Protein backbone atom coordinates (compact mmCIF):
# COMPACT_ATOMS: atom_id res chain seq x y z
CA UNK A 1 0.00 0.00 0.00
CA UNK A 2 1.30 3.48 -0.82
CA UNK A 3 2.47 5.66 2.06
CA UNK A 4 0.92 9.07 2.68
CA UNK A 5 4.02 10.65 1.10
CA UNK A 6 3.74 8.57 -2.05
CA UNK A 7 0.00 9.23 -2.30
CA UNK A 8 0.77 12.91 -2.00
CA UNK A 9 3.29 12.68 -4.88
CA UNK A 10 0.82 10.74 -7.03
CA UNK A 11 -1.83 13.39 -6.48
CA UNK A 12 0.68 16.09 -7.41
CA UNK A 13 1.78 14.22 -10.52
CA UNK A 14 -1.65 14.31 -12.19
CA UNK A 15 -2.22 18.01 -11.51
CA UNK A 16 -0.97 19.09 -14.92
CA UNK A 17 -3.47 17.02 -16.91
CA UNK A 18 -6.29 17.61 -14.42
CA UNK A 19 -5.84 21.38 -14.56
CA UNK A 20 -5.76 21.29 -18.35
CA UNK A 21 -8.98 19.29 -18.54
CA UNK A 22 -10.67 21.56 -16.00
CA UNK A 23 -9.84 24.64 -18.06
CA UNK A 24 -11.31 23.03 -21.17
CA UNK A 25 -14.47 21.88 -19.37
CA UNK A 26 -15.12 25.41 -18.12
CA UNK A 27 -14.78 26.77 -21.65
CA UNK A 28 -17.23 24.18 -22.97
CA UNK A 29 -19.78 24.82 -20.21
CA UNK A 30 -19.80 28.58 -20.49
CA UNK A 31 -19.17 28.87 -24.22
CA UNK A 32 -21.02 26.01 -25.99
CA UNK A 33 -20.14 25.41 -29.64
CA UNK A 34 -22.14 27.30 -32.22
CA UNK A 35 -23.83 25.68 -35.15
CA UNK A 36 -21.18 24.43 -37.58
CA UNK A 37 -23.05 26.09 -40.42
CA UNK A 38 -22.28 29.54 -39.00
CA UNK A 39 -18.67 29.06 -37.84
CA UNK A 40 -17.02 26.64 -40.26
CA UNK A 41 -15.64 28.49 -43.29
CA UNK A 42 -15.42 26.95 -46.72
CA UNK A 43 -11.95 25.32 -46.72
CA UNK A 44 -11.49 26.25 -50.36
CA UNK A 45 -12.01 29.92 -49.51
CA UNK A 46 -9.83 29.98 -46.39
CA UNK A 47 -7.29 32.79 -46.31
CA UNK A 48 -5.90 32.13 -42.83
CA UNK A 49 -5.17 29.10 -40.67
CA UNK A 50 -5.11 28.75 -36.87
CA UNK A 51 -3.65 25.60 -35.33
CA UNK A 52 -4.46 25.02 -31.64
CA UNK A 53 -2.39 22.58 -29.54
CA UNK A 54 -3.98 21.33 -26.31
CA UNK A 55 -2.34 20.53 -22.99
CA UNK A 56 -1.34 17.23 -21.38
CA UNK A 57 -4.16 14.70 -21.06
CA UNK A 58 -6.60 16.80 -23.08
CA UNK A 59 -7.92 16.42 -26.63
CA UNK A 60 -8.35 18.56 -29.73
CA UNK A 61 -12.16 18.35 -29.99
CA UNK A 62 -12.55 19.43 -26.35
CA UNK A 63 -10.85 22.72 -27.25
CA UNK A 64 -12.91 23.56 -30.32
CA UNK A 65 -15.20 26.00 -28.41
CA UNK A 66 -12.20 28.35 -28.30
CA UNK A 67 -12.94 29.45 -31.86
CA UNK A 68 -16.28 30.89 -30.69
CA UNK A 69 -14.35 33.80 -29.19
CA UNK A 70 -13.19 34.88 -32.66
CA UNK A 71 -16.23 36.83 -33.80
CA UNK A 72 -14.60 39.55 -35.90
CA UNK A 73 -15.36 39.49 -39.65
CA UNK A 74 -11.67 38.86 -40.37
CA UNK A 75 -12.11 35.27 -39.14
CA UNK A 76 -14.95 34.30 -41.48
CA UNK A 77 -12.38 32.86 -43.87
CA UNK A 78 -10.21 31.20 -41.23
CA UNK A 79 -9.59 27.47 -41.26
CA UNK A 80 -9.11 25.93 -37.79
CA UNK A 81 -7.36 22.74 -36.71
CA UNK A 82 -7.60 21.14 -33.25
CA UNK A 83 -5.49 17.97 -33.44
CA UNK A 84 -5.23 15.49 -30.58
CA UNK A 85 -1.89 14.34 -29.18
CA UNK A 86 -0.97 10.65 -29.47
CA UNK A 87 -1.02 8.48 -26.36
CA UNK A 88 2.44 8.32 -24.79
CA UNK A 89 3.95 7.41 -21.40
CA UNK A 90 4.67 10.49 -19.29
CA UNK A 91 7.53 10.48 -16.79
CA UNK A 92 6.02 13.03 -14.39
CA UNK A 93 2.92 10.81 -14.16
CA UNK A 94 4.98 7.74 -13.28
CA UNK A 95 4.92 6.44 -16.84
CA UNK A 96 1.15 6.53 -17.19
CA UNK A 97 0.01 6.55 -20.82
CA UNK A 98 -2.12 9.53 -21.83
CA UNK A 99 -2.52 12.08 -24.64
CA UNK A 100 0.86 13.83 -24.66
CA UNK A 101 2.81 15.64 -27.35
CA UNK A 102 6.15 14.87 -25.68
CA UNK A 103 7.56 13.67 -22.37
CA UNK A 104 7.55 15.86 -19.25
CA UNK A 105 10.03 14.96 -16.52
CA UNK A 106 8.54 16.76 -13.53
CA UNK A 107 5.81 19.01 -12.22
CA UNK A 108 5.51 21.69 -11.30
CA UNK A 109 7.40 22.79 -14.39
CA UNK A 110 10.04 25.35 -13.43
CA UNK A 111 12.55 27.40 -15.38
CA UNK A 112 15.11 24.66 -14.65
CA UNK A 113 13.01 21.56 -15.37
CA UNK A 114 15.02 18.98 -17.39
CA UNK A 115 14.19 19.05 -21.10
CA UNK A 116 12.97 16.08 -23.14
CA UNK A 117 14.39 17.48 -26.36
CA UNK A 118 14.26 14.34 -28.51
CA UNK A 119 10.53 13.82 -27.99
CA UNK A 120 9.89 17.56 -28.44
CA UNK A 121 11.67 17.55 -31.80
CA UNK A 122 9.64 14.52 -32.89
CA UNK A 123 6.40 16.33 -32.02
CA UNK A 124 7.60 19.41 -33.93
CA UNK A 125 7.75 17.36 -37.14
CA UNK A 126 4.06 16.53 -36.77
CA UNK A 127 3.16 20.20 -36.34
CA UNK A 128 5.28 21.23 -39.30
CA UNK A 129 3.44 18.69 -41.47
CA UNK A 130 0.14 20.39 -40.60
CA UNK A 131 1.56 23.81 -41.41
CA UNK A 132 2.96 22.54 -44.71
CA UNK A 133 -0.45 21.13 -45.62
CA UNK A 134 -2.05 24.54 -45.08
CA UNK A 135 0.64 26.23 -47.19
CA UNK A 136 0.18 23.64 -49.95
CA UNK A 137 -3.53 24.44 -49.81
CA UNK A 138 -2.83 28.03 -50.78
CA UNK A 139 -2.66 29.81 -47.41
CA UNK A 140 0.22 32.27 -47.03
CA UNK A 141 2.61 31.45 -44.15
CA UNK A 142 2.05 35.05 -42.99
CA UNK A 143 -1.57 34.13 -42.28
CA UNK A 144 -0.77 30.97 -40.32
CA UNK A 145 -0.88 31.09 -36.51
CA UNK A 146 0.13 28.36 -34.07
CA UNK A 147 -1.32 28.60 -30.56
CA UNK A 148 -1.20 26.30 -27.56
CA UNK A 149 -1.87 25.88 -23.85
CA UNK A 150 0.57 24.41 -21.30
CA UNK A 151 2.36 21.49 -22.99
CA UNK A 152 0.75 22.66 -26.23
CA UNK A 153 2.19 26.11 -25.58
CA UNK A 154 5.68 24.69 -25.20
CA UNK A 155 5.21 22.77 -28.45
CA UNK A 156 3.91 25.92 -30.14
CA UNK A 157 7.12 27.72 -29.24
CA UNK A 158 9.31 24.89 -30.49
CA UNK A 159 7.36 24.53 -33.73
CA UNK A 160 7.40 28.22 -34.59
CA UNK A 161 11.10 28.62 -33.84
CA UNK A 162 12.11 25.64 -35.96
CA UNK A 163 9.84 26.29 -38.95
CA UNK A 164 11.93 27.57 -41.90
CA UNK A 165 9.53 30.37 -42.83
CA UNK A 166 8.08 33.48 -41.22
CA UNK A 167 4.61 32.70 -39.85
CA UNK A 168 1.84 35.08 -38.84
CA UNK A 169 2.59 34.37 -35.19
CA UNK A 170 2.90 31.94 -32.32
CA UNK A 171 0.82 32.30 -29.12
CA UNK A 172 1.98 30.55 -25.93
CA UNK A 173 -0.40 30.18 -22.97
CA UNK A 174 1.01 28.94 -19.65
CA UNK A 175 3.89 27.31 -21.50
CA UNK A 176 7.63 27.03 -21.11
CA UNK A 177 10.85 26.74 -23.14
CA UNK A 178 11.07 22.98 -23.88
CA UNK A 179 14.69 22.83 -24.98
CA UNK A 180 18.15 24.14 -24.14
CA UNK A 181 19.87 27.20 -25.58
CA UNK A 182 21.83 25.02 -28.02
CA UNK A 183 18.70 24.96 -30.19
CA UNK A 184 19.23 28.65 -31.01
CA UNK A 185 21.77 27.71 -33.66
CA UNK A 186 19.06 25.77 -35.51
CA UNK A 187 16.60 28.67 -35.80
CA UNK A 188 16.18 29.77 -39.41
CA UNK A 189 16.62 33.52 -40.04
CA UNK A 190 13.06 33.71 -41.47
CA UNK A 191 11.65 32.18 -38.27
CA UNK A 192 13.19 34.99 -36.25
CA UNK A 193 10.69 37.39 -37.84
CA UNK A 194 7.69 35.46 -36.48
CA UNK A 195 6.07 37.43 -33.62
CA UNK A 196 5.39 35.67 -30.32
CA UNK A 197 2.57 36.37 -27.83
CA UNK A 198 3.20 34.83 -24.39
CA UNK A 199 0.48 34.83 -21.71
CA UNK A 200 0.92 33.39 -18.23
CA UNK A 201 -1.02 33.42 -14.96
CA UNK A 202 0.97 34.74 -12.02
CA UNK A 203 -0.71 32.22 -9.68
CA UNK A 204 0.08 29.18 -11.85
CA UNK A 205 1.36 26.39 -9.59
CA UNK A 206 1.55 23.75 -12.33
CA UNK A 207 3.75 25.55 -14.85
CA UNK A 208 5.28 28.12 -12.54
CA UNK A 209 5.24 31.78 -13.52
CA UNK A 210 9.05 31.70 -13.42
CA UNK A 211 8.97 29.17 -16.27
CA UNK A 212 6.97 31.64 -18.32
CA UNK A 213 9.22 34.54 -17.37
CA UNK A 214 12.21 32.63 -18.73
CA UNK A 215 10.66 32.76 -22.20
CA UNK A 216 11.28 36.39 -23.27
CA UNK A 217 15.01 36.42 -22.34
CA UNK A 218 15.49 33.14 -24.23
CA UNK A 219 13.72 34.57 -27.28
CA UNK A 220 15.71 37.79 -27.07
CA UNK A 221 18.95 35.79 -27.17
CA UNK A 222 17.56 33.95 -30.20
CA UNK A 223 16.79 37.23 -31.96
CA UNK A 224 12.97 37.13 -31.74
CA UNK A 225 10.49 39.64 -30.42
CA UNK A 226 8.03 38.60 -27.72
CA UNK A 227 5.00 40.31 -26.23
CA UNK A 228 4.69 38.97 -22.67
CA UNK A 229 1.48 39.40 -20.68
CA UNK A 230 1.13 38.47 -17.00
CA UNK A 231 -2.32 37.82 -15.54
CA UNK A 232 -2.65 38.40 -11.76
CA UNK A 233 -4.86 35.91 -9.95
CA UNK A 234 -4.86 33.43 -12.84
CA UNK A 235 -3.76 29.85 -12.21
CA UNK A 236 -3.13 27.10 -14.72
CA UNK A 237 -6.00 27.87 -17.05
CA UNK A 238 -7.06 30.11 -19.92
CA UNK A 239 -9.18 33.16 -19.20
CA UNK A 240 -11.71 34.90 -21.42
CA UNK A 241 -9.50 37.99 -21.24
CA UNK A 242 -6.58 36.04 -22.71
CA UNK A 243 -8.64 34.70 -25.58
CA UNK A 244 -10.08 38.10 -26.47
CA UNK A 245 -6.54 39.48 -26.43
CA UNK A 246 -5.51 36.66 -28.75
CA UNK A 247 -8.33 37.50 -31.14
CA UNK A 248 -7.20 41.14 -31.30
CA UNK A 249 -3.53 40.17 -31.66
CA UNK A 250 -4.16 37.81 -34.57
CA UNK A 251 -6.65 40.17 -36.24
CA UNK A 252 -4.07 42.96 -36.33
CA UNK A 253 -1.55 40.68 -37.96
CA UNK A 254 -4.05 39.32 -40.45
CA UNK A 255 -4.74 42.86 -41.60
CA UNK A 256 -1.05 43.64 -42.02
CA UNK A 257 -0.25 40.40 -43.81
CA UNK A 258 -3.25 40.20 -46.15
Image: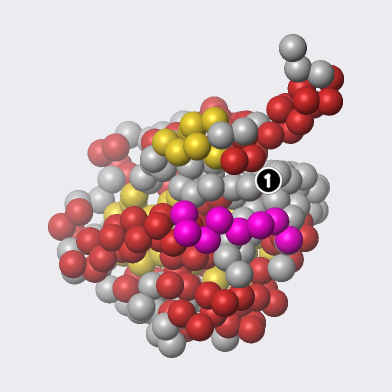
Single out the residue that lies furthest toward the front.
1
Residue in view at x 64 percent, y 82 percent: 220
Q: Is residue 240 visible?
A: no
Q: Let me know if residue 54 is in the magenta part.
A: no
> Which quadrant of the rendered structure holds the N terminus?
top right
Magenta stretch bounds: 112-119
The x and y percentages for residue 111 are 73, 61
Q: Secondary structure at mark 1?
A: loop
Query: Is residue 121 positioned above or below 70 on the image?
Result: below
> Which quadrant of the rendered structure holds the C terminus?
bottom left
User: Pointer 1: what residue?
Assistant: 106
State the predominant SS element of the stretch in magenta: loop
The x and y percentages for residue 174 are 64, 53
The x and y percentages for residue 193 are 47, 83
Q: Nearer the viewer, residue 86 or 206?
A: 86
Residue in view at x 56 percent, y 34 percent: 95
Amino acid sequence: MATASVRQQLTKSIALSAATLAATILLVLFHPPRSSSSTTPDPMAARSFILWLHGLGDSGPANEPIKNFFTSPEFKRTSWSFPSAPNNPVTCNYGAVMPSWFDIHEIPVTADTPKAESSVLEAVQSVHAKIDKAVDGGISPNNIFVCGFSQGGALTLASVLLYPKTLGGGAVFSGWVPFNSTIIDRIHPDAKRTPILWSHGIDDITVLFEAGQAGPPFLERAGLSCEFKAYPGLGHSISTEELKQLESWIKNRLQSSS
